Image (cartoon, rainbow, N blue to C red):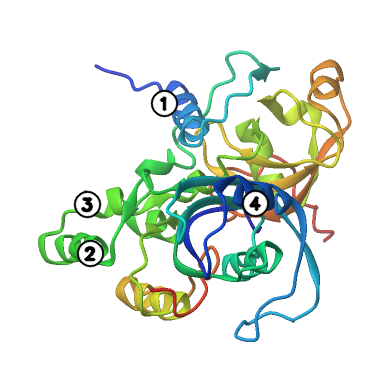
Amino acid sequence: MHSSKEYVCVMQLHRPVSEERLREVLSEFTGRIYQRPPVRSSVKRSLRVKVVHEIELLEYTGRYALLRIASEAGTYMRKLCWDVGLVLGVGAHMRELRRTRTGPFTEDRGLVRLQDVAEALYRFREEGKDDLLRKVVLPGEFSICHLPKVVVRDTAVESLIHGAPLAVPGIVMLHEGIKPGDTVAVLTLKGELVALATAEMSSEQVISERRGIAFRLRRVVMEPGLYPRTWKRREQKA
Amino acid sequence: MEERDVTKEGMSFIREIDEFCGYNRRWLVKLEGEPTDPRYGWLPRERPIGKYIEYGVINLDKPPGPTSHEVVAWVKRMFGVQRAGHGGTLEPHTP
């Protein structure tokens, strides 16, 4: 799953323009834009449409502009700055870039450096204490925090892992606002991520119906065997 | 003797996940009071360390210089795991 990103970048203008003009052009680059990946990239260089959710001009000195940009995954900031320069008519390029958000992960939440990882591992291996390790590594469940969630009963878990769709009777609770076609995260009552799924019913339907397929699993994450099987194995004929 | 309420702790964790990214949609409850059996599975924070790492995620501030691919290779070696991924590369030669 490719999540949206946020960046802060410094754009250098080759000649100064008025702040008003800069803001005007920046607003033209919000919404859907065309982009072709640069020569130095690992993706196919076809012309693509990308969505820029937001551009905020944080500071402007006439020469440098500090921008905060929120965009779809796969949007090139360097190309965006270059193209802004073209439209302004004076030329521009990106000088500095920092990604400040990837999906749900921001700079102020659990950001660690390689040194922190190394120290946490050392403490675990040499001293037998996993406390730092459990601070540095987060449960993977945090990476789906931006999805609507559906909680299932213990008795439904193992059959889901073995490929069964998620039917209404297995559902304990879910977020409001889910519509057919939405991607959701399926969790156990303990909060463990079981799978990612696509909605066949809306939240309201799930609540009002007594039976029926509510979600189809797209990607199972949990391993089998943690929760008990609650269906009979096929009898072997003697 | 103190009995832990694993179901309650599970609910707290689920709410914590929502809070992590400010997800504030309301919950609709169909089966009020449905319990979870502490004998099966784990509260994610209490997974044995091997599984905790296997299903874990690191929000890493990548140093400038090495590529994301290189950093992932280092992290895999440090942890002794076979598979690890990253959430997207940044443009090269960004100072």
Residue that mark 1 sits on: B9
Q: For mark 3, what is the residue?
A: A132
The answer for which chain carries disc 3 is: A
Q: Mark 2 points at which residue?
A: A121
Q: Looking at the picture, does residue A84 appear above or below residue A194?
A: below
Q: Report, in whole angstroms, how far the alpha carbon at label 4 lies from the one at label 3.
A: 43 Å
Q: Which of marks 2 and 4 is in front?
A: 4
The verdict on a common chain for dots 2 and 4 is yes
Sequence-earlier tag: 3 or 2? 2
Placement of the N terminus of chain A among the 4 image quadrants:
bottom right
Q: Considering the numbered disc 1 on the image, is that residue within a helix, a strand or a loop?
A: helix
Tell me which chain the residue with mark 1 is part of: B
The chain carrying label 4 is A
Instruction: Give the percent coordinates (x, y) of residue B6.
Output: 42, 26
Does the image show residue A192?
A: yes
Question: Which amino acid does the dot numbered 1 rest on?
Answer: Glu
- First in residue order: circle 4 vs circle 3: 4
